[in-house]
Image (cartoon, helix red, strand yellow):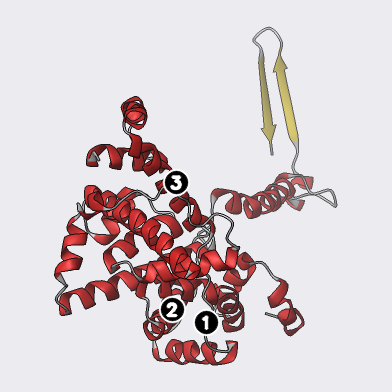
Amino acid sequence: MDEKKSLELMALLDGTGEPGRREAVEAWLCSEPDAEALRQELSWVRQALREHEPATKVPETREFYWSQIQRRMDQAAPFEPRPEPRRRFGDWLSWLVPVAGVAAVTLLVSLHPWQGGPLNPGLNEATATTYTSEADGVTIHWID
Amino acid sequence: MPSSLKNDYPSSPDEALVGWAQKGDTEAFEELVFRHRDKIYARAMMMMRNEEEAMDLSQEAWVKSWQRLHQFQGDSSFATWMTRIVINLCLDQIRRQKKMRAESIEQIEEEAGGVERQMPVEHVNPIEGLEKEELRKRIDEAMAKLTEAHRTVLVLHEFQGMEYKEIARKVGISIGTVMSRLFYARRRMASLLQGLKRERKI
């Protein structure tokens, strides 16, 4: 039997063969009496293995098996916990928004004129004179 | 972990247990061991065909996973991640053993390929009508009769789901060798399963 075509047939059954070779392999399957039997053999073996993996159980009790693992874990290098993930932009934004809000309120309060009285008591004693000339478009203030 | 939640281990999904274990919770890790120990042991047993080695390597795999748990990102399931670890340990062990022992002429001929050309094609499917457990048992018996090289490629492809390229890289052979070993292994399995059927009839 053609070894190269046999391997190509297997690769096609496994879904990894070259698509361009499908026709050549199919022609071979029709021309060679044993080739179709080989295809069937490879198919049922493949299916049987994939669907019936032998299941072997640990021949020890849970406690004994775990105690042996635990003993090895204690002797091995110390446990390394997973580091906390680095903050992403979204995480930064979640606390940046309230901080920015507080800062804005603080700024507004500091710039707003004090309602409870004059900011500078000394200004009550000052006198101001204003001269305006409409023709010249000029306004002059004198503060004494 | 609050003590009130400790009883939740058995009903918690793997993802939650992994998360707790990554923070150093050994009880969560123990639950993961309990859940997946048979699968990990079975994979090691399939590769090594030796109970003592399978036990040792499966336990080693759990210790390795505990140490590397911080690297687990959840890209695959925890069980898949664990089977990769145990497979790697088995391959390392096989490499070490291979260096130490001379192989038989039969093995060398089989691994070189070409023997399968002399094998007749099995026209009758010997597994038809078999109960699942009986079939599993027969497959296990047949796998034990394969050479290590063929069994390794078969396990990696059929049970571990690896592609030819990935197997070639892992085992350190060419893709062509992977294909010829896999081809031979399947043909030999067909022949062995047919033989087991005949034996049972007698």
Left or right for B59, reference B29 = left
Q: Mark 3 highlights which residue?
A: A43
Q: Mark 1 highlights which residue?
A: A58
Front position among marks 3 and 1 = 3
- Chain under callout 1: A
Q: Which of A144 and A3 is in front in this view?
A: A3
Decide: is B152 above or below B25: above
Q: What residue type is labelled 2?
A: Ser
x and y percentages locating residue B111 in the rendered image: 21, 60
x and y percentages locating residue A35 in the rendered image: 34, 38
Q: Mark 2 highlights which residue?
A: B58
Is residue A22 in view from this perspective?
A: yes
The quarter of the picture where the N terminus of chain B appears is bottom right
Q: Which residue is drawn at 34% across and 39% down?
A: A34
Q: How far apart are marks 1 and 2 (CA)?
A: 10 Å
Mark 3 and mark 1 lie on one chain; the one further toward the N terminus is 3
Q: Are marks 1 and 2 on the same chain?
A: no
Front position among marks 1 and 2 = 1
